[in-house]
Structure formats: structure tokens, C-alpha cells
Amino acid sequence: MGSRRPQRGQAGLSPTLTVARSHVALPGVREDKETKTRSTRTVILDDATVEMLAQLRDMRAEIGIEPELPVFTDDGGTPWRPDGASTRWARVRKKAGVDKSIRLHDLRHWQATQLLDAGVPLPTVAARLGHASGMTTMKIYAHRTAQADEQAASIVGDVLIYVDGSWLFQSRKILPMGMLELGGLTEFPG
């Protein structure tokens, strides 16, 4: 909840958002603290998100609210309580006709699964999620990447063929050392 406005990266690079703090709201305590992993992460933002954040900044400036406040604050600059974000999500979800069982946190899981299924490298997905390592990401999401497993099976199936009791490579795309070429097909040794 402590996310600040995007910053323009180095000359010509995409805008970024840095997550460096977390907001805690408990009975009698409201404060910013380090993130769960005690690390800062910076992620690149897409153009639509940058535009939406620019509109928010401009709207705040027009009505006299400090435009550079953290994104998730009320008009006085007080950070939202985490349950406040969930309450707002429930209203948006209902208007959009999304099943009420979909929690705000489920969007995080959805993003991770979509990125992994699309072939985004594990270290990139882990960094975007703020995981300390790719192992954490895989422990949580490995079972959710059936599409990637189907893709792997298809690739292997497209390359291998079983003929007369032998597995053969149909393609020279993959030619491990020690394979024997047999007129367009390659036989496993031995």
C-alpha cells in the first residue's frame, strides 16, 4: 500500500514504480515499515497504467491535493488501511460482474500465473512479486502452470517420433551430441 508514483527510468527507458515500504494498520497503530522481505523492488509499468496514474496526479492537483502523495491515500494524504483496499475492490468487482469469491489478493496470483504461462523468466516474475528468490515463486505457483507443461509436452512431441522400436528426432532443431543422422531423422544411440 505504500507504493509511490512512477519514476521515469534512465533516458528513453520505461517508467518504473518502486515498492520500498509497507503500510500497517492495526488497532492503535498506523505506520509505514519495511516490506515483508525487507527489500525494495522496482517494476516497469505499462503505458496504460502510467497514463492512469498521470490522470490521478492531475486530478489531485486540480482540487488542491498534493499530487505526489503515495497512490493509495485518501484526500488528506492518509494511507488506506489494507482492508480499505479490499472494500474498494469488492465494490469494483461487483460493478464489473466478477464472481464475489475473487479476492483482491487473487489478482496477484492471477498475474503470476499469467506471466509464467506466457514464458516470462522466473527471476523476472519473482522480482515483480517481491519474492526473495525464484524458489519462493515456484513453491507457490509451480502447480498452476499446466499450460506451460502442456507446451513442453507439445515441443517434445513435435521433435520425437517412435519408429520400429526406436525413438527418433524429427528435427535438427534439437540435436544432442552423439546422435546419429539417418536421412532427416536422428536416432538415439545405443
Image (tube, helix red, strand yellow):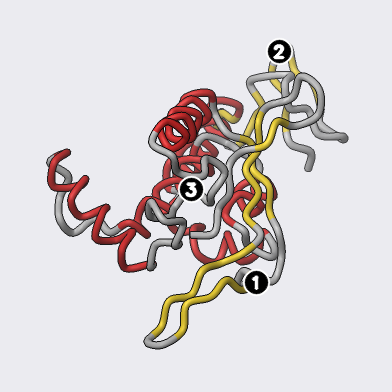
Which residue corresponds to mark 3? Answer: 71
Rendered location of residue 33, percent (x, y): 61, 73
Q: Which mark is residue 64?
A: none
Q: Nearer the viewer, mark 2 or mark 3?
A: 3
Q: Which mark is residue 34?
A: 1
Q: Which mark is residue 184?
A: 2
171 with respect to 110 (left or right) = right
Callout 2: SS: loop
Task: Give the farthest residue toward the right.
Answer: 177
Mark 3 / mark 1, whichever is N-terminal: 1
The one of 38 and 51 positioned closer to us in this rendering? 51
Rendered location of residue 42, percent (x, y): 68, 47
Please name the amino acid that badge 3 sits on.
Answer: Val
Please name the amino acid that badge 2 sits on.
Answer: Gly
Q: Nearer the viewer, mark 3 or mark 1?
A: 3
* Residue at the spot 26% in from the left edge and 54% down from the top edge: 88
Q: Nearer the viewer, mark 2 or mark 1?
A: 1
Q: CA distance from mark 2 to mark 1?
A: 59 Å
Callout 1: SS: strand
The one of 49 and 68 positioned closer to us in this rendering? 68
